[in-house]
Image (cartoon, rainbow, N blue to C red):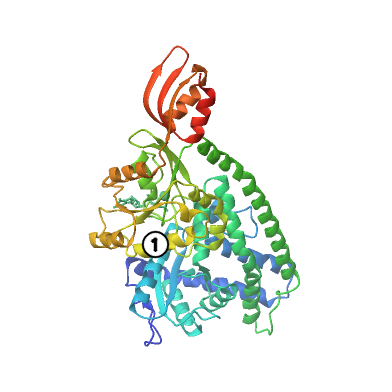
């Protein structure tokens, strides 16, 4: 085995040896050498009297280290393709904590597996995953210094260049842990932000993610600079905070801070300026009384697949987390011909960084406007209830969502355990069991949507002049037509529409 716990009483729970482990073994020597070489460089620099050049080195180290996993940079413009690819080849070790008994351990394991999927989605190779039992996180080093030292051994043995902690680390914890394990440490939040940054396509989505990243980075900026200088200082045996933690370094950090704040202000303005276009579209749909059905749910639950099954939309489906970041809106029709829209939304995840919830608030607020919420659940997942809870937690932060009728759509019925499906059905008020793959339950879901959508309820019998083809079109889209006749002076329509359209028809009628 690649790592032997030094304290057998509370050992790390390592994953079973895999091909990845053996590959890692094969390359371990090489990578360990690289890590040592890096430390050597730092030591050499720390030993010299500080110059502006040192500041640059610090900055270099800081930028590459931050950028390689976090996708963040204090130089906001210059992420190159080459570095982007580098980032995709991270070799990572995952680490998490749990307190309490078997149930807590199982839950932590599901969470760690999800973290592995997230890391892989970000392009990393996961070499190992470790869980530690601990009453609560150590405020200093998250794991406690003994376990952190063990982690350092594991990291060196498998040749990892990054540790990902299954939590949001305080800036000081991350720094302290990094000092011990000697490779870059990132947390779950940074990883999720990184994936969002890779996947955002629209201008608005990109701006939202960048804003969230900067918000995450801002309080961590000082820590990073201090960490590097402290390491360098410590290695040459100097006392105190170490050289480079004040003076030019400090100024640089202040400068970076100001630049980041300016950038954030600019992004906020841009996002605000983009909102009207979306709001206009939404109002347009409203004016035309086209109801919206929002699809929400945990990442990888099958939301896009379901949208495709319902509308043949051809939306990107991927066995990856956060495949969809930019909301897709598609038109659909009930079997009796009423038009509605279906909106695919960003997937949710446990501990979705609050910075992202904030940044995506405007997008999520659209759910509050929906006539119906389809909460898609992967019924074949080991912990569907946990996923349902995580989704509801985020949704509960958005005012108005609680008034939208919700249907729990238990997807992947083709591979789900019927006992689990039954368990959720008993717990949830309204459910429908479907498989986006086999088509099972889709007809039932369509019928349910048709039932749930507001029905036009004002009786009309009007003759619309031929000059107002637009109104006739709208009755076709949003109303129910019993009879349609082409007369000399216009189109006679009998049926039902909603009150606002009825009023417009009344005004236009001959
Ligand atoms: N077996 C099975 N797999 C499904 C079903 N529906 C979706 N999948 C698979 O689940 C994976 C995720 O599907 P998506 O539709 O991309 O999921 P999503 O909820 O849109 O995911 P994100 O956009 O990443 O949040 C894909 O590999 C799909 O092929 C289903 O009914 N049965
Ligand atoms: Mg999707």
In what element is the residue under mark 1?
helix
Asked if residue 165 is positioned above or below residue 242 in the image, the reply reads above
Q: Is residue 366 above or below residue 42?
A: above
- Relative to 222, 111 lies left or right: left
For mark 1, what is the residue?
387
The N terminus - image quarter: bottom left
Residue 14 seen from this side: no
Task: Give the total number of marks visible in the rendering.
Answer: 1
Indicate the position of residue 293 as horizontal and vertical percent values. 43, 45
Q: Residue furthest left?
A: 418
From this viewpoint, is residue 441 visible?
yes
Residue 131 position by quadrant: bottom left
Locate residue 16, reporting x and y percent: 32, 72
Residue 428, given in percent of the width and then of the height, sits at: 34, 59
Q: Is residue 384 left or right of residue 140?
A: left
Between 265 and 500, which is closer to the camera in this rendering? 500
From the viewer's perspective, is residue 110 above or below residue 461? below
Rendering coords of residue 130 (x, y %):
40, 74
Front-lying residue, 250 or 427: 427
The answer to whether mark 1 is within 8 Å of ligand 1 is no
* Residue drawn at 44 percent across, 64 percent down: 350
Q: Nearer the viewer, residue 86 or 272?
A: 272
Q: Residue at x 47, y 78 (%)?
A: 152
At 49% from the left edge and 68% from the top edge, which residue is drawn?
Answer: 162
């Amino acid at each position: 085995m690649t790592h032997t716990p030094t304290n057998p009483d509370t050992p790390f729970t390592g994953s079973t040896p895999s091909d990845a482990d053996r590959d890692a073994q094969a390359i371990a020597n090489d990578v360990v050498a690289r890590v040592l070489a890096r430390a050597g460089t730092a030591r050499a620099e720390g030993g010299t009297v500080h110059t502006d050049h040192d500041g640059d080195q610090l900055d270099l180290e800081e930028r590459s280290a931050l950028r390689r996993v976090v996708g963040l940079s204090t130089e906001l413009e210059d992420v190159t393709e080459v570095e982007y690819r580098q980032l995709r080849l991270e070799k990572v070790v995952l680490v998490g904590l749990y307190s309490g008994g078997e149930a807590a351990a199982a839950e932590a394991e599901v969470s760690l597996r999800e973290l592995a999927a997230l890391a892989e989605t970000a392009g990393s190779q996961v070499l190992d995953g470790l869980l530690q039992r601990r009453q609560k996180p150590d405020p200093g080093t998250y794991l406690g210094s003994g376990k952190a030292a063990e982690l350092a051994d594991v990291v060196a043995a498998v040749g990892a260049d990054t540790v990902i902690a299954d939590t949001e680390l305080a800036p000081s914890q991350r720094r302290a842990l990094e000092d011990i394990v000697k490779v870059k440490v990132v947390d779950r939040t940074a990883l999720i932000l990184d994936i969002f940054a890779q996947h955002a396509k629209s201008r608005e989505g990109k701006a939202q993610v960048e804003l969230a990243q900067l918000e995450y980075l801002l309080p961590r900026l000082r820590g990073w600079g201090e960490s590097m200088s402290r390491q360098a200082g410590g290695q040459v045996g100097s006392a105190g905070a170490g050289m480079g933690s004040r003076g030019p370094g400090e100024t640089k950090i202040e400068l970076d801070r100001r630049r980041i704040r300016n950038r954030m202000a600019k992004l906020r303005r841009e996002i605000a300026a983009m909102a009207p276009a979306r709001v206009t579209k939404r109002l347009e749909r409203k004016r035309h009384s086209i109801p919206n059905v929002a699809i929400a749910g945990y990442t990888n639950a099958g939301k896009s697949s379901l949208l495709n099954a319902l509308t043949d939309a051809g939306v990107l489906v991927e066995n990856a987390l956060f495949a969809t970041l930019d909301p897709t809106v598609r038109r659909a029709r009930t079997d009796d011909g009423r038009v509605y829209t279906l909106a695919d939304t960003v997937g949710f995840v446990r501990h979705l960084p609050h910075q992202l919830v904030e940044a995506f608030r405007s997008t999520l607020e659209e759910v509050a406007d929906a006539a119906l919420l389809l909460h898609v659940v992967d019924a074949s997942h080991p912990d569907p209830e946990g996923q349902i809870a995580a989704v509801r937690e985020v949704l509960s932060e958005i005012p108005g969502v609680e008034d939208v009728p919700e249907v729990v759509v238990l997807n992947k019925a083709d591979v789900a355990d019927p006992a689990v499906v039954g368990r959720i059905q008993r717990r949830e008020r309204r459910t429908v069991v479907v498989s986006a793959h086999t088509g099972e339950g889709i007809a039932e879901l369509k019928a349910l949507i048709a039932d749930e959508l507001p029905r036009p309820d004002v009786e009309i019998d009007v003759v619309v002049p031929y000059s107002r083809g637009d109104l006739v079109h709208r009755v076709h889209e949003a109303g129910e037509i019993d009879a349609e006749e082409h007369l000399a002076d216009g189109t006679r329509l009998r049926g039902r529409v909603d009150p606002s359209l009825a009023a417009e028809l009344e005004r236009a009628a001959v």
